Amino acid sequence: MHSSTLILYKLISEPDLNSKQNAIGLSLIGILLANDILPYYVPPTPTGNLPPVKTGSILSTIPNDLTKDKFNDTILKNMKNTYRNIYAAAAGAIGMLLNIKKLKNETNQRLLEQLNLILKWHNSQGLSDTYVTCIYSIQKHYPLIVDKTVMNKLIFGFKKMYGDIKIESLESLIANITEFDLAYLELRAAGILDSLIH
C-alpha cells in the first residue's frame, strides 16, 4: 500500500510561514506514519516477477524530481512555521518518520542532518519555546533525539520556562535520561529537582 505522494506533497507545500494551510496535509501524513505507511511512494526493488510500471498509470504521474528527500525537506520546512500547531505537527511527523526508518534499518543520516539545521536555526533565533515544542514532538516517537547536547539545552534553559513549555521540557528530558551518566547530579545542579519538589 502506498499513499498519493503528489497530493500529499501539494498539501504541505505552502511556502508562506505565516499560513496554516499545510495543517491538513501534515495531519494526513501523521495518520499514515502512525500506521507505518510512508507518505511518499518508494518503488519496490525489482525481483524479476513484477511487471514494469506502464506509462499512464497513477504511479508514473509522480514527477521525477519529487524524491523522498525533497518530500522530507518540505516537512522539515514546516517546522519553521510561526504557528505552533504546524511546527509541532511537522516535528511529530519527522519523529515518526525517523522511528519507521530506524525500525526498517534504513539510514537516517541525511534526515538527521537536515533536522539538526532546523533545530539550530530555532535555537539561534532565540525561539526557545518553539525549540522545546519541536524536541518534545519528535521525542514522543524518536527518543534518541534527546542526546547530550539537547539535554544540556533543556536543562540550562529550564528556569526560564513556564507552563506547558516547562512540562514539555521535563517530558523530553525523561525520554532518554537513562542513557546519560550522572543525570541526577546534572538535574540537581540545574535546580530542576528543587523546582519539582516545590
Image (cartoon, rainbow, N blue to C red):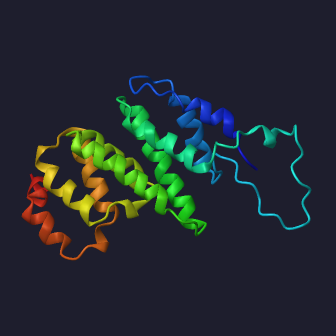
Name which quarter of the figure residue 197 lies in: bottom left
* Along the viewing direction, whichever of 160 and 171 lies nearer the viewer: 160
Name which quarter of the figure residue 46 lies in: bottom right
Residue drawn at 12 percent across, 44 percent down: 160
Tell whether 51 sits left or right of 35. right
Residue drawn at 37 percent across, 29 percent down: 83
Q: Is residue 169 above or below residue 11?
A: below
Give how far across and how far down residue 47 sits, in percent: 85, 68
Residue projecting furthest to the front: 65
Residue drawn at 54 percent across, 33 percent down: 12
Q: Is residue 29 above or below residue 110?
A: above
Give how far across and how far down residue 79 sits, in percent: 40, 39
Q: Is residue 33 above or below residue 130?
A: below
Q: Is residue 110 above or below residue 9?
A: below
Name which quarter of the figure residue 106 lies in: bottom right
Tell whether 59 sits left or right of 195. right
* Along the viewing direction, whichever of 87 and 166 lies nearer the viewer: 87
Tell whether 170 sits left or right of 193. right
Residue projecting furthest to the bottom: 181
